[in-house]
Amino acid sequence: MLRVALPNKGRMAEEARALFADAGLEVRPSSDRSLIAAVSDDLEVIFARSQDIPEFVADGAADCGVTGRDLVLESSRPLADRLDLGFGRCRLVFAVRDDSPIEAAAQVDGTVRVATAFPRLTERFFAEQGRGVQLVPVSGAAEITPHLGIADAIVDLVSTGSTLRTNGLRELATILDSTARLVTRDPVAPSQAGELDALVARLDSVVRARGQRYLMANVPRASLGRIKEVVPGIDGPTVMDVLDGGAHVAVHAVVAAAKIDATIRGLKSLGATGVLVTRIERLVP
């Protein structure tokens, strides 16, 4: 029995459950207040705050967990980053008020007060710059602290940066980029290595499929010499004879969703017909 820790609320919780469902592991808690949900005979989910999941996994309460890379690094616990899940994208940034004289992290001296919910990462960042700061630990709403005189600067998570700009703050540096990760203890217990590897592969097949499309088309045989320029695919397109046998061949390939329209235009320029594009549920390398 594997025990997986998933976020209990928020956007990351929704996306984590969607990922597991796409992998055939639908998480169905009995109620909104459920702390545990049985997914299958050999997998159980526990729900926890994202910031607690690194501790739960490191302490053995869960065998693996889904949480942000920022929280994993802040925890400083011995965890293995097994899979980038691709959602929950954000940045940890250093920011000051618009009217602050500070223009770069190199100008910070030991008197500057920095409000943050990430004291370890903040201290490490400024230490790497050869600078010291006065940490002001907060659990949220760091962006208001410079306006209240509590801090001179902040280190906080942003997605687009619009919240900082709305609150009269400007970014000076990106400390790290973060996405949701599947993490395990490091090292993994030998008795669980196989089961965890299988779960990682299962989820990875869904992550790989997202943003990809399966494309099929009938292409004139005379255009085969140019087809790889238009449809590169993963290892090149698959080409098969059509039963009517002659002038056309069937071309199949996996194409990035963002390149589908350009690929179709290229195929049509080669005289392709019957172009079909479908979604891919899972993609195993």
Image (spheres, rainbow, N blue to C red):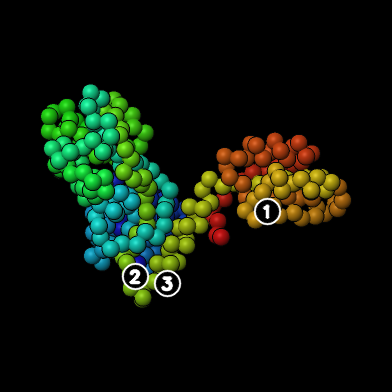
Q: Residue furthest right?
A: 246
Q: Position of residue 47 (x, y in %)?
A: 28, 54
Whichever of callouts 1 and 3 sits on the residue coming sooner in the sequence is 3
| Proximity of marks 1 and 3: CB atoms separated by less than 8 Å | no
Give the residue number, with chain letter if any, for mark 3: 194
| Proximity of marks 3 and 2: CB atoms separated by less than 8 Å | no
Mark 1–mark 2 Cα distance, whole angstroms, equals: 37 Å
Q: Position of residue 168 (x, y in %)?
A: 25, 25
Q: Amino acid at mark 3?
A: Gly
| Residue 244 higher or lower than 136, as above or below | below
The image quarter in which residue 66 lies: bottom left
Q: Is residue 78 visible?
A: yes
Quadrant including the N terminus: bottom left
The reply, left or right, for residue 253 in relation to residue 165 is: right
Give the residue number, with chain letter if any, for mark 1: 236
Q: Amino acid at mark 1?
A: Gly
Quadrant including the C terminus: bottom right
Residue found 71% across the figure and 38% down from its top: 266
Mark 2 secondary-structure assignment: loop
